Image: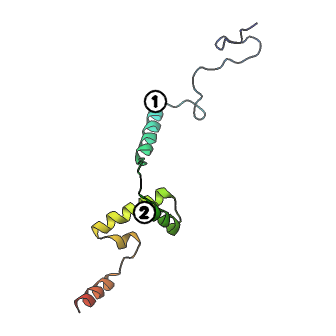
Amino acid sequence: MKDPCDHYTFDLIGGVQKKPGRKPLGERAMTVAERKRRSRELRRNRLQELSVTVELSREAQKSLDKMIEWWGVSKKEAINRALLIACQSQMGRTASLFGFELPPEGKAAARKNKDA
């Protein structure tokens, strides 16, 4: 009779000995290079999405809620868009964010109207 707590001794009555350790992710165990590649990829993905915790004023929270309603996106996406818009507006490239690129002849016409 086999001790129920013994997981290492082979069962002589038709059982199969279990291999120690974790089950492989697929048909076979990964090589060292495959494990390292997977580890680097997971680490790279974690670093791309950095977490930030902030406290918003009531006014800022209302503005965020309005942006979520207008754009129909999540809080995360609304904050990302708002930050990009703020940064681009400081650099004078807000129109490119929304796809409002003027054609080359339109830019020249716009300058002529400003001069007149």
Q: Residue furthest top?
A: 1
Q: Considering the numbered disc 2 on the image, is that residue within a helix, a strand or a loop?
A: helix
| Residue at image point 53% right, 65% down | 72
Distance of mark 2 from mark 1, alpha carbons?
Answer: 53 Å
Q: Residues within 10 Å of mark 2 (few under 14, many from 20)?
A: few
Q: Which residue is mark 2?
A: 59
Circles 2 and 1: CB atoms closer than 8 Å: no
Where's residue 116, x and y in %?
A: 23, 93
- Colour setup of the view: rainbow
Q: Which residue is mark 1?
A: 32
Q: Considering the numbered disc 1 on the image, is that residue within a helix, a strand or a loop?
A: helix
In the image, residue 41 above or below residue 31: below
In the image, residue 79 above or below residue 39: below
The amino acid marked with disc number 1 is Val
What's the mark number on residue 8?
none
Q: Residue furthest front?
A: 58
In the image, residue 55 above or below residue 40: below
Which mark lies nearer to you, 2 or 1? 2
The amino acid marked with disc number 2 is Glu
For residue 21, which quarter of the picture?
A: top right
Where's residue 109, x and y in %?
A: 29, 88
Pick whichever, 55 or 109, lies toward us.
Answer: 55
| Residue at image point 44% right, 60% down | 58
| Residue at image point 64% right, 13% down | 8
In the image, residue 7 above or below residue 76: above
Q: Residues within 10 Å of mark 1 (few under 14, many from 20)?
A: few
Where's residue 74, x and y in %?
A: 52, 59
**Lateral position of residue 29 relative to residue 79, left or right:** right
Q: Which comes before the other along the chain, label 2 or label 1? A: 1
Question: What number of labels is visible?
Answer: 2
| Residue at image point 73% right, 17% down | 15
